[in-house]
Amino acid sequence: MVRNSRNASGRNLVSFIQLSNIEGVKLVKAVSSSDSRGRFLKFRPLILLHSKLDSVAVSINPRAGTIRGIHFQVEPFAEEKIVTCIQGSIFEVIIDIRPNSKSFGKIATFELSQDNSSQVYLPKGVTHGFQTIMPNTIVQYILTSQYSPKSSYSINPLGDLDIEWPQKDFLISEKDAQGVSLAYAAEKYAESLKL
């Protein structure tokens, strides 16, 4: 699906494309082995990151349909992220808000799950959000910057993006539901690069 939404300069802000078409984003499969005890997965995040690892965070989501995001931070706290669904399944949404990127304004959606053993690398300026498809879903984030409330934004995932969320019965925080528009997010991110 393609939705045309333009900013003041007439530049196209929204269109849905394949994940591989978002500049710098990488989908990586884990090295895995299994036996009668279960599965063992190994990821190597440091080969993906261009900045120093700052922290690892975990999101525990008891309910299917939970929406988190669509989040990003502006400079000087913009961050690279590696997102992994270690239990359950998520419908992942990413948006490129980097002003000089060939994939500026593009949106990609895809599934991350414990079964596909994948993780996604997101460079600075690529936003991230998801909806849980299964109950008791656990998502791990590897981050290169500390959390900064003054530099942190949420794009309204229910706004003008026309995202087809798979779960119609959903749970979302008030902050995320009142997030900014994509045009405002792109403007704030571009402004932060000039400082």
Image (cartoon, rainbow, N blue to C red):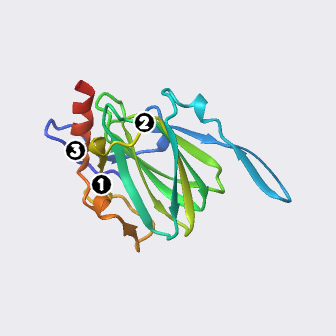
Q: Quadrant of the N terminus?
A: bottom left
Q: CA distance from mark 3 to mark 1?
A: 11 Å
Left-right relation of 190 to 43: left
Element type at mark 3: helix
Q: Which mark is residue 178?
A: none
Residue placed at 36% from the left, 65% from the top? 172
Task: Decide which of 172, 23 is in the foreground and name it.
Answer: 172
Left-right relation of 106 to 28: left
The percent coordinates of residue 154 (x first, y second) are 31, 51
Q: Nearer the viewer, mark 3 or mark 2?
A: 2
Mark positioned earlier in the residue sequence (3 or 2): 2
Q: Quadrant of the C terminus?
A: top left
Mark positioned earlier in the residue sequence (2 or 1): 2
Q: Is residue 23 visible?
A: yes
The percent coordinates of residue 194 (x first, y second) are 23, 25
Q: CA distance from mark 3 to mark 2?
A: 24 Å
Q: Is residue 158 visible?
A: no
Task: Decide which of 17, 114 is in the foreground and name it.
Answer: 114
Residue lying furthest right in this view?
Answer: 36
Element type at mark 1: loop
Element type at mark 2: loop
Residue placed at 51% from the left, 40% from the top? 55
Mark positioned earlier in the residue sequence (3 or 1): 1
Q: CA distance from mark 2 to mark 1?
A: 27 Å
Residue placed at 32% from the left, 31% from the top? 76
Return the residue at label 1.
Answer: 161
Q: Which mark is residue 145?
A: 2
Q: Which mark is residue 183?
A: 3
